[in-house]
Every structure is written in structure tokens, then in C-alpha cells.
Image (tube, helix red, strand yellow):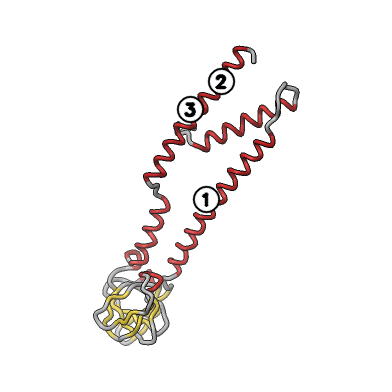
Amino acid sequence: MKEWNPGMMTLIGFAITVAYGYSVATVLGLKGVDFFWELATLILIMLLGHWIEMRSVMGASKELELLVKLMPDEAHLLRGDDLVDVKTGELKEKDVVLIKPGEKIAADGVIVGGESYVDESLLTGESRPVEKKKGDKVIAGAVNGNGALRVEVSHGAKDSYLSQVVRLVEEAQGAKSKTQLLADSAAQWLALIAIVAGTGTFLTWVSVGT
């Protein structure tokens, strides 16, 4: 209401407030019939609707968390003949990492050594492991098969394919479709018309002594 942008919840809040106030007044002696049962039913239906909505949102959030968990926390960085474990977020372009059999690939990159089959099903939907050899690209979060791979990192973790997917999902959750915007506009007009009509009806009844 402070933003002068009434919607469906404005109308519901107005209805609940008026119905409760009037029902209390009838209990205190005002001539009329209370609406406590109708009010409780309205609140129950609204809460049920919000519960269903939040359950859907939480389901999408959990799927997003599963995507994030696909990214390994550490990577085996090759520095000359030495192998150093570093945080995945510290990897930079041109770094070479070792992916051991059964491990998740730590970063997007190009294979510079080794051959293996890589399971990308959770990322690309490919049902079977894909054969990868020198010169092929690999995606962070995919699961390496039985062979060891040396991968040259193409870019940092923030720009990885998986990170971009996560960002797109988050943006899609926060954005509204044209249908939602149309529904919001319709709800705004409905709230305004209902409140004005209801207030006008009340004032008319009072003026004629009903």
C-alpha cells in the first residue's frame, strides 16, 4: 500500500480485517451476523495456497543446491612434477589439473593428456558416458570414468558451464513471465474495483440507514 501498488493480497487483507472487525462488533452487541467461520475458511484457503506455492519454490531451490554440489571443492593442480591440492575457486585459465578415476571434473577445460569415459548425464542429459581423449572439451561437475585425465583449465569457476546454469536458474526464479505480469495487473485492478465498490456500498447503506 505504501508503494500504491495494491494486489490480490491487499484485497485479502482488507477482507479479513473488515470481516473480523464486523464480527467482533456483532459479538459486542451490534445487530447482525458474525462471519468467523467464513473468515477462518478464507484464511485456511490462503495459507494452503501459500504452502503449495512455497513447496514448489523450495523444490526448485533444492534442485539448484544439487547442481551446486556437483562442483568439487578441491582440485589436483599440476605444478611441474608436483601435485598440489587447491580450492576449485583458485583455478585460473591455463592451469593444468589432474582428474583421477571416479572423481568429478574440477573445471571446464580441454584434455591435454589421457583418455576416459565421462558421465555428463546430470549436466547435459546424455544418458551414457561419453568417450573423451586429448583435445576434447570437458565440463566441470561431470564424473570421470576409469582413466586419469589431465585437463587444461579454460576459465575460472565463476565462468564455468555449471555456474552459468545455476545463474540462469536463479534469474528464472526471480523473473516474472508475461502471464504473471498480466495476472498482477488484473489483480491490481480487481483489488481497486472491489475496495471502491465495497466502500461505496457500505457508505450508501449507512446513508440510507440500512
Q: Earlier in the sequence, mark 1 or mark 2?
A: 1
Q: Position of residue 39 (x, y in %)?
A: 65, 36
Residue designated by label 1: 53
> Does the residue at mark 2 contact the one at mark 3 (Cβ under 8 Å)?
no
> Does the residue at mark 1 contact the one at mark 3 (Cβ under 8 Å)?
no
Residue designated by label 3: 193
Vertical placement of residue 79 versus 196, above or below:
below
Tell me which amino acid carries mark 1. Glu
Other-residue count near label 1 (Cα within 10 Å), few / some / many at <14 / 14–19 / ≥20: few
For the point 50% across and 59% down, the residue is 59
Residue designated by label 2: 201
Q: Earlier in the sequence, mark 2 or mark 3?
A: 3
Vertical placement of residue 32 versus 16, above or below:
above
Picture quadrant where residue 125 is located: bottom left
- Left or right, residue 200 beside residue 68: right
Secondary structure of the residue carrying numbered label 1: helix
Tell me which amino acid carries mark 2. Thr
**Mark 1 to mark 3: distance in Å?**
26 Å
* Tally of numbered discs: 3
Vertical placement of residue 46 versus 66, above or below:
above
Closer to us: 126 or 6: 126
- Left or right, residue 175 beside residue 191: left
Q: Nearer the viewer, mark 1 or mark 2?
A: 2
Vertical placement of residue 169 versus 90, above or below:
above
